[in-house]
Image (spheres, rainbow, N blue to C red):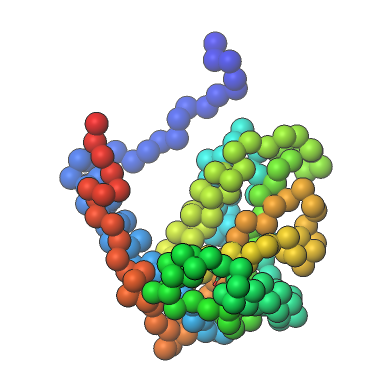
Amino acid sequence: MKPHDSLPYTQLPEYSDAERIARSRAFYEAIRTRRTCRYFSDEAVPRGVIENAILAAGTAPNGANHQPWHFAVIESAEKKKALRATAEEEERAFYQSKGSEEWLEALAPLGTDADKPFLETAPYLIVIFGQRKGGMNPGEMKQNYYVNESVGIATGMLITALHDAGLATLTHTPNPMKFLNQLCSRPNNEKPMMVLVVGKPAADATIPVHATIKKPLDQIASWL
Ligand code: IYR
């Protein structure tokens, strides 16, 4: 007997080797067109797209299946304005003095600065929280495990789902982030980890060439 209630493993499609190679190549060709966006259109995007993308993110592998995440979706103009005001204040401190010379030098080819108008322009800001405590059921306060890893994987799946739906994203990391708990009415044991800006790119959006240079396979993988 198995030590747990069990179901047969999910039926995966029976592809030929050639089909698997073609499909993995096609997926790579699709995902390699993803670009971080810093210029957003204010055009509306249906809430259903965001809901489905969050449902997809919620299937991510995670510690003990406690699903230690919360996605606070900001769509109100006032909340966006408040988030932008605090984030820009912090970014000004970062770009003017707090950021080390080495760090600012590393960012120079991206052309980022303290101005973040997209935080008000884009239709959605998804604030992603990691839950240090929780468990599977509402109201539980069990220890959660591998919170950073779990939320990182879920965020990657969220970005991938949104890209697949034809939407642009920006992973924004205001520093420090604690103000996001109050802004999103989230409890103190939750750790804000990322602001994901979501929408359509502005018609005249550009990307830094620097960001398009990806390491080749032999630099990012080894076979042993
Ligand atoms: N949080 C800042 C700075 C920044 C840091 C890194 I590392 C980036 O890859 C990009 C930006 C900002 O949002 O501008």
Q: Measured along the vertical axis of the image, is residue 98 above or below residue 7?
A: below
Q: Is residue 62 left or right of residue 110?
A: right
What is the quadrant of the C terminus in the image? Answer: top left
Q: Which residue lies most toward the bottom here?
A: 204
Q: Measured along the vertical axis of the image, is residue 14 above or below residue 69?
A: above
Where, by quadrant of the figure, is residue 174 drawn? bottom right
Q: Which residue lies most toward the top here?
A: 1
Residue at 32% across / 75% down in the picture?
Answer: 209
Q: Measured along the vertical axis of the image, is residue 209 above or below residue 58?
A: below
Q: Is residue 114 left or right of residue 78?
A: left
Residue 117 shows in this picture: yes
What is the quadrant of the N terminus in the image? Answer: top right
Is 51 in front, or is 190?
190
Q: Is residue 10 left or right of residue 70?
A: left
Image location of residue 213, percent across then percent down: 29, 66
Q: Is residue 194 left or right of residue 186?
A: left
Image location of residue 39, percent across then percent down: 49, 81
Residue at 25% across / 45% down in the picture?
Answer: 20
Q: Measured along the vertical axis of the image, is residue 27 above or below residue 135?
A: below
Residue 162 shows in this picture: no
Q: Which residue lies most toward the left here?
A: 18
Image location of residue 82, percent across then percent down: 74, 77
Q: How many marks?
A: 0
Is 170 in front, or is 105?
105
Image location of residue 223, percent across then percent down: 24, 36
Residue at 29% across / 38% down in the picture?
Answer: 14
Residue at 69% across / 52% down in the picture?
Answer: 191
